[in-house]
Amino acid sequence: MKVVILAGGIGTRISEESHLKPKPMIEIGDRPMLWHIMKIYSHYGFNEFIICLGYKGNVIKEYFINYLIYESDVTFNFKNGKEIFTHQHYAEKWTVTLVDTGYATATGGRVKRIQKYVGNEPFLLTYGDGVSDININELIKFHRSHGKCVTVTAAQPLGRFGALDISEVGEVKGFKEKPRGDNSWINGGFFVMEPEVFDYLSEDSVNLELDPLQRISADQQFMAYRHCGFWQPMDMMRDKALLEELWKTGNAPWKVWD
């Protein structure tokens, strides 16, 4: 299966960094968030990526153009017309297709634009700003078991608020400090989609999460894979700080690769 990553949004809620680069290129440790996501999929044997570009897409293109140099010791020989030699480099198994899907295109429009690169086969899709310790193989196994058009990963992020159990007369019967997901499930990305999903997508302005997925749900073709493990987006600077701390201390649950 090919892996499609949505990487074209502006990232206004983390504008402290996204004014310089697209959100998937904001670094956790010394690596872009996009790299972390690709390493998760690669760990499970999925190495063919289609990345949907938009806002500051050239930053992502330049990263992959120079990826080998970034990952290697390099010698520049200026005597012979600037020859470049790389040393002790590690080559990823990746094939990466970078597609300009438009600056202002909505998520559904971006997916529609990469249809020709996916072809008539199932594919994986996620956002360029969230990491998880999800088992991709188990996700796919679940998707194949029900035979529907779309599977979304339902996640429970770290809670932000304490939860009260209140009786009808107002008595507090119990208190739970910051339950995961604040006792709710959310769209965690990490989709599996059949090619029929493209039939629900039309113009660039279509938001995948609104009309298309609602119609797929109404057609009883939408299933959720409950992931009870780690999942964390990078929406704001406090999210980045959390991910940075986990990575720096060697406690990053999403680092499933060696």
Image (cartoon, rainbow, N blue to C red):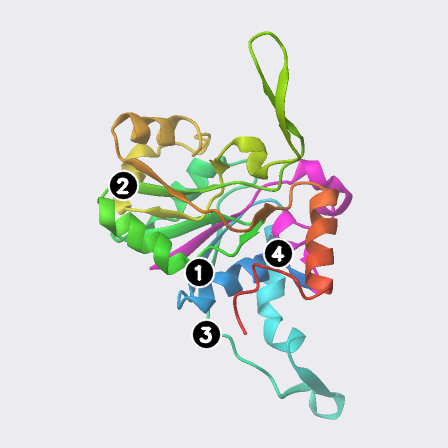
Task: Say if the magenta span includes residue 22.
Answer: yes
- What's drawn in magenta, residue-wise? 1-30
Identify which residue is drawn at 56% across, 40% down.
Answer: 103
Q: Residues within 10 Å of mark 1 (few under 14, many from 20)?
A: many
Label 3, label 4: how far apart the Cα atoms are: 18 Å
Identify which residue is drawn at 63% across, 60% down.
Answer: 252
The residue furthest top is 169
For the residue marked with disc 1, what is the amino acid? Phe
Label 2, label 1: how far apart the Cα atoms are: 21 Å
The residue furthest bottom is 79
Which mark, by number, is residue 149? 2
Which residue has dot 1 on it? Answer: 49
For the residue marked with disc 4, what is the amino acid? Met
Which mark, by number, is residue 93? 3
State the SS at label 2. Answer: loop
For the residue marked with disc 2, what is the amino acid? Cys
Quarter occupied by the C terminus: bottom right
Which tag is nearer the camera, tag 1 or tag 4? 4
Can see residue 249?
Answer: yes
Which residue has dot 4 on it? Answer: 33
